[in-house]
């Protein structure tokens, strides 16, 4: 009879959750394997068993953040209106960030120097944005501009407003959701053919 697994996927998820929380609230200096293990009521042996060490834990954290975020963006249905698809992807971007702020902050932290494979994974995360922009340009909805340039500008609008919201930097009384959607729509109109 095989030995029962004590270091399972549930423990792996708890360790990643705690690492993401520590990184987003206390910064990279708080990411001690001992602290993470203690906080989830396990040992550093479990962390080494599941991840192999701190660099691999950080890489797994980065990968998890992109996986979660990418799932939200990829869930937006593709329709015959690529301009509206972009708006919906932008709204999914905000929903994802608000639903999982710890992992959203991991996406943009510099605690992990992305490897080539990690950079490819990040690129795949934003594939729905690039695809919708490309379709909008190819079908004449958007001006004949470089799709990468348009996608980057949309990302900047989304990231900037979401970051202001998550960090509590929006002025009092601002309806964040309405302002965000208006900004996305105004940005999209700016690229119309």
Image (tube, rainbow, N blue to C red):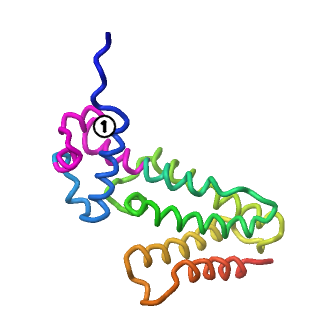
Residue visible at 33% across and 40% down in the picture: 12
**Label 1: element kind:** helix
The quarter of the picture where the C terminus appears is bottom right
Q: Left or right? Give the position of 58 relative to 144.
A: left
Residues in magenta, as a range? 35-63
Q: In the depicted view, which residue is nearer to us: 7 or 161? A: 7
Q: Position of residue 132 (x, y in %)?
A: 71, 61
Q: Position of residue 185 (x, y in %)?
A: 67, 78
Q: Is residue 85 above or below residue 3?
A: below
Q: Residues within 10 Å of mark 1 (few under 14, many from 20)?
A: some
Q: Is residue 182 above or below residue 71?
A: below
Residue visible at 50% across and 71% down in the picture: 159
Q: In which quadrant of the rendered view does residue 37 lie? A: top left
Residue visible at 51% across and 56% down in the picture: 69
User: Which residue is tagged 1?
Assistant: 51
Residue visible at 51% across and 80% down in the picture: 176
> Does the magenta stretch mainly form a helix, a strand or a loop?
helix
Q: Position of residue 117 (x, y in %)?
A: 47, 44
Q: Is residue 60 magenta?
A: yes
Q: Position of residue 63 (x, y in %)?
A: 43, 47
Q: Is residue 58 magenta?
A: yes
């Amino acid at each position: 009879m095989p030995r029962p697994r004590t270091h399972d996927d549930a423990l792996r998820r708890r360790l990643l959750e705690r690492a993401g929380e520590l990184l987003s609230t206390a910064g990279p200096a708080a990411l001690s394997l001992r602290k993470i293990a203690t906080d989830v009521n396990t040992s550093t042996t479990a962390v080494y068993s599941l991840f192999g060490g701190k660099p691999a834990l950080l890489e797994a954290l980065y990968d998890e953040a992109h996986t979660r975020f990418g799932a939200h963006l990829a869930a937006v249905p593709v329709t015959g209106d690529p301009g509206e698809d972009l708006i919906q992807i932008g709204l999914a971007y905000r929903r994802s960030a608000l639903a999982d702020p710890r992992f959203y902050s991991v996406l943009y932290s510099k605690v992990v120097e992305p490897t080539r494979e990690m950079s490819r994974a990040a690129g795949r995360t934003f594939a729905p944005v690039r695809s919708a922009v490309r379709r909008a340009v190819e079908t004449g909805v958007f001006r004949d501009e470089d799709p990468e340039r348009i996608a980057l500008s949309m990302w900047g609008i989304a990231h900037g407003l979401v970051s202001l919201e998550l960090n509590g930097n929006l002025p009092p009384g601002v309806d964040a959701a309405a302002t965000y959607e208006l900004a996305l729509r105004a940005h999209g109109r700016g690229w119309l053919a």
